[in-house]
């Protein structure tokens, strides 16, 4: 009997204590994520050259911008991580990528990359764990997605100029989730729009209707790019066995300005596990600049004389996203005088590579 009374008293005391604690909190704090799933976690870091460690969910953000995660749709499951990257991280990714940017391809027959007018951007890939900054971003993404970094593909970096777009498509098949990280936002257009989706909350739909969206994005669940933000959506149903048809999305045409973004595709199992393990152990070897005409192999002249420029053009001259190993021997580029930037740009143009314009980065 005494034990029963004590137990009841303990329960009443505990309940009173819980109510006291709850009374000291705001209603917003009590049920975070109840409507629209918005959670604010403010950066207080100051600028430094230090890279945030792998255990941190947040980037080093020199402007102390607030970071929060916001669900925008349940069909598909889609959420925005506001200020996922700092300005310096955005710039770092672009600096690593721009020399190798080439006309983007899509997956064609036999899984080969082919150029198609459905996708008119320029792009390249950054190897997983390419440097400490990329590794930290990948780990941050793993913490957010609850999928290990070994399940991520290499980071694809893309640049969309005026009229550039990526038509409606699904990333499904073996990919379970897609993450779009915005590095430079365009002045107008360039939204990511879901063609078969539903907003998670009527308030978000109302905000979209009042926003200055391009024609492509109007009337759809759409996200307007903002530098540093990341949009993650799941390409599969929660059972990971079926493609979620609501994940059909399009990269709306850029109307004004330029859009840069990075893409990470996530898998339910390790993606090319042996390749990932090697990346953890082997330092990345920078690729040569396609604007500099050179042979990358000592046998290039011999192979050219044997007719390999015609017989094996993919290796010798280049194909898809890859740069040829023997462009000089195949007379596919010009040997430039020192400081001749016109010649340098012609070499990049002839190989299908982007001529980078610093001004389009808006000072980051």
Image (tube, rainbow, N blue to C red):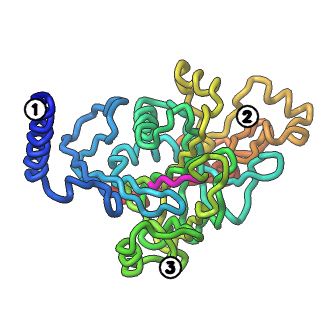
Quarter containing the N terminus: top left
Mark 3–mark 2 distance (CA, rounded to whole Å): 48 Å
Mark 1–mark 3 distance (CA, rounded to whole Å): 61 Å
**Image quarter of residue 126:** top right
Which label number is shown at residue 6? 1
- Residue assigned mark 3: 219
Q: Position of residue 219 (x, y in %)?
A: 50, 79
**Taking 256 as reference, is 182 above or below it?**
above
Residue drawn at the location 64% of the way across and 62% of the way down: 245
Q: Mark 2, mark 1: which one is toward the viewer?
A: 1
Q: Position of residue 165 (x, y in %)?
A: 60, 66
Residue drawn at the location 39% of the way across and 74% of the way down: 202
Residue drawn at the location 71% of the way across and 32% of the way down: 295
Mark 3 or 2, nearer chain start: 3
Write the start and end of the magenta stretch as one range.
231-235
Secondary structure under the numbered disc 3 in the rendered image: loop
Secondary structure predominantly adopted by residues drawn in magenta: strand
**Taking 126 as reference, is 272 above or below it?**
above
Mark 2–mark 1 distance (CA, rounded to whole Å): 82 Å
Which label number is shown at residue 325? 2
């Amino acid at each position: 009997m005494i034990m029963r009374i004590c137990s009841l008293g303990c329960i009443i005391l505990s309940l009173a204590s819980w109510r006291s604690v709850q009374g000291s909190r705001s209603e917003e704090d009590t049920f975070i994520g109840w409507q629209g799933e918005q959670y604010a976690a403010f950066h207080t870091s100051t600028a430094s050259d230090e890279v945030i460690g792998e255990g941190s969910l947040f980037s080093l953000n020199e402007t102390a911008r607030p970071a929060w995660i916001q669900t925008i749709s349940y069909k598909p499951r889609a959420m925005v991580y506001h200020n996922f990257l700092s300005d310096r991280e955005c710039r770092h990714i672009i600096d690593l990528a721009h020399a190798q940017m080439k006309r983007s391809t899509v997956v064609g027959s036999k899984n080969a990359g082919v150029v198609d007018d459905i996708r008119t951007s320029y792009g390249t890939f950054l190897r997983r764990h390419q440097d400490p900054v990329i590794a930290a971003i990948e780990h941050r993404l793993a913490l957010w997605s609850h999928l290990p970094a070994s399940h991520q593909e290499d980071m694809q970096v893309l640049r969309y100029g005026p009229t550039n777009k990526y038509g409606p498509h699904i990333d499904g098949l073996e990919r379970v989730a897609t993450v779009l990280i915005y590095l430079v936002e365009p002045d107008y257009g360039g939204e990511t729009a879901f063609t078969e989706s539903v907003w998670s909350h009527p308030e978000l739909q109302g905000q979209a209707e009042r926003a200055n969206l391009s024609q492509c994005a109007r009337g759809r669940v759409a996200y307007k790019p903002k530098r540093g933000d990341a949009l993650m959506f799941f390409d599969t149903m929660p059972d990971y066995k079926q493609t979620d048809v609501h994940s059909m999305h399009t990269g709306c045409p850029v109307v004004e300005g330029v859009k840069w973004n990075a893409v990470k595709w996530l898998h339910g199992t390790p993606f090319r596990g042996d390749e990932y393990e090697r990346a953890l152990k082997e330092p990345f070897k920078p690729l040569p600049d396609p604007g500099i005409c050179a042979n990358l192999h000592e046998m290039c002249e011999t192979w050219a004389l044997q007719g390999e420029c015609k017989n094996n053009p993919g290796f010798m001259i280049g194909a898809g996203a890859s740069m040829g190993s023997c462009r000089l021997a195949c007379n596919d580029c010009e040997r430039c005088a020192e400081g001749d930037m016109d010649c340098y740009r012609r070499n990049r143009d002839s190989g299908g590579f982007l001529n980078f314009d610093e001004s389009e980065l808006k000072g980051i």
